[in-house]
Image: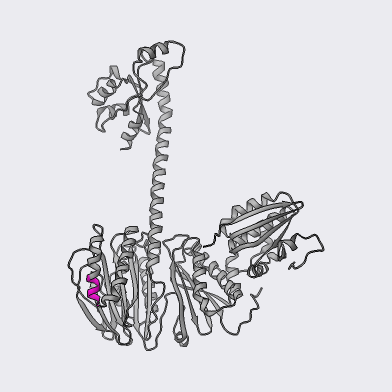
Amino acid sequence: MPDRRFEADVRVEASLAVVVLTGDIDREAESGLAEAYVASGEVGVILLDFSAVGYINSTGIALIVRFLADGRRDRREIRACGLSPHYAEIFELTRLSDYMRIFDDAASATAPAGETTGGRA
Amino acid sequence: MALIGSLRRSLRREPPTPAPQAVADAQRPTKPTLEAGPQVDIAAADPLLAYLQSAPGPVVLASLELDSPAVRDLREAGIALVVPLVSQGELIGTLNLGPRLSEQEYSTDDRRLLASLATQAAPAVRVAELVQERAGEIQARERLEQEMRVATLIQQQFLPHELPNLPDWQVAAYYGPARAVGGDFYDFIELPDGRIGIVVGDVTDKGVPAALIMARTQSVLRGEAPRLMSPGAVLQRANEILLPEMPARMFVTCLYLVLEPSTGRVVYANAGHLPPYVRTVDGVVELRATGMPLGLLPGMAYEEKEATIDPRQSVLLYSDGVVEAHGPEGEMFGFPRLRELMAHELPSSELLNHLLEELHEFVGRSWDQEDDITLVALERTGGGDFALLSEPDPAGAEAADRRLLLSLSLPGEPGNERTAMNRVAEAVAPLGLETARLERLKTAVSEAAMNAIEYGSQNDPTIPVEVAAWVAGADLVVSITDRGLSGPIPDAEQPNLEAKLAGEQKPRGWGLFLIKNMVDAMEVVTEGTAQTVILTLHLKGVDDAGPQV
């Protein structure tokens, strides 16, 4: 059985923090996501990379809403990339995509302005 | 006993008369060393205890005139002064002191100081004792809960995951475990000649031992039934195997019935279990056969009898948890009531629903279920069918083209929503759903099961959640049934994302919204206290346009 434990690896690069998420985003991810937000420091943009996420349930959606709410409070832009087609659909259904730009991959999400390609934003 | 325990902990003293070198050391201006003295046990009936309980303060042993073995022992141990620790009128311990290092008597000021110290220390010692007792109770309860979880898992593992698909027969089953897990079980065993063995049993005792015996009995029956075929011989062999393994004061009652679906002929034997009822045109009769429970005595033979179940007749196998359920006034549900309910001409699934509704009405809302309840109903019908308890009404033309894919019962434990999701995904794999539709179904099942576990079972592993999947005509239907402990399932509403982002609403509350949008139809059906979420996916004529946002 694959390891489904949630982990968040934060990498801060100049004005952007990349949070690489791994495992399942459910109730077990609560503290990990909250810690990842804090570890992102005070950069202007946080990119959530979902490439290695296999499962997100409604509790996970709520955690992402909270992450997004924290970002709005602190005037930070939250982006997302690496969502599977199913979870991209759920992000649209829940209208999370109205409040976070969604990209295919980390490269397009972190490209300088005007160079973004392949994004859904 | 707590008193003696406290005393034992406190009956220690400073060393009595110091050794010459220690005295010499004490006379120098160095800090005297303290160490625990010998322990003195005081018998519960010793008069010293009563004396100390009412003593106004520290007691000088040298001047105490009391016929007490404890006083003698304390003096021999070098104790000079005993300070009683009394909290709320109860003697909870003593401070025992040897002679002063200066070899002078304890002064009035010393005794006053010690009395004051005892007044303050006694409640603190009592509180510490209570905390320790409470910690012990919590640990014991956690151990018990863990045992119950294990027992439930064992039971769930061994119960059938699917009902048999028998042409011209409708089969329904219900298993409702009590909070304190018992050892009920039922089983369907396919035999090589096309007949089917049907087992209902009950292990005495509860918890892990009962669950293990239940699993072992089921394993023995599954092993012996296809080989021996004859119900009497199967029970006889099972008794021989189980007897040496059976713990003291445990045994298993078991009814084993072999059905030939094409003719309705049943052959059965009974190891001390309640006899099944058969509803005939002439009324309700019992299928009786004699035999001792399994695991009690060696060399038992089991009477074997035959009967024929005609079209429109029904058989009900049940456990004692039904008839021995108590109402609010302490009265039992009883055999006459069950027999009367059995007389109603109802399809198998409706019969079980009707029985359970009547049972719940009888026991009342505050029912603390004492024992497992198992019901298996068979009805010989004209058109081959089967039904699950939690399915919607199977009557009508639709019933004929139903195909059961999955039926399972899961402990109401967080995390099992993943099991439900994965089992449904496996069961529907032969249907070849498009990836996007399969993913949506998985999300819907996971969310519905998570709600059922969190709200319907209140995260209690002993309260199961039932999941079933079947194809009905051109639809795939999945049902998730819970016990409705948190009341009715609300309507699915569009969450207010803006309010959640602004912190005006909690970020949660997406489950029902997701479920509704992941499938073609979502319906909530209430049956008694049970609630079923029914998810429907159309299998034909569907483009993959995605959910309606």
Q: What stretch is highlighted in magenta?
A: B230-236
Q: Which of B345 and B277 is in front in this view?
A: B277
Seen at 39% across and 76% down, the residue is B163
Q: Where is residue B374 in the image (x, y as percent from the top left)?
A: 34, 70
The quadrant where residue A104 appears: bottom right
Q: Magenta stretch: residue B233 in it?
A: yes
Main SS category, magenta section = helix
Number of marks present in the image shown: 0
Q: Most extreme residue toward the right, as rendered? A: A114
The quadrant where residue B540 appears: bottom right
Q: Identify whether B524 is placed above or below B23.
A: below
Q: Identify whether B259 is placed above or below B455.
A: below
Q: Identify whether B26 is placed above or below B349.
A: above
Q: Nearer the viewer, residue B287 or A118?
A: A118
Seen at 46% across and 83% down, the residue is B402
Compared across the picture, whether B544 is left or right of B351 comes to right
The quadrant where residue B119 appears: top left
The quadrant in which the C terminus of chain B is found is: bottom right
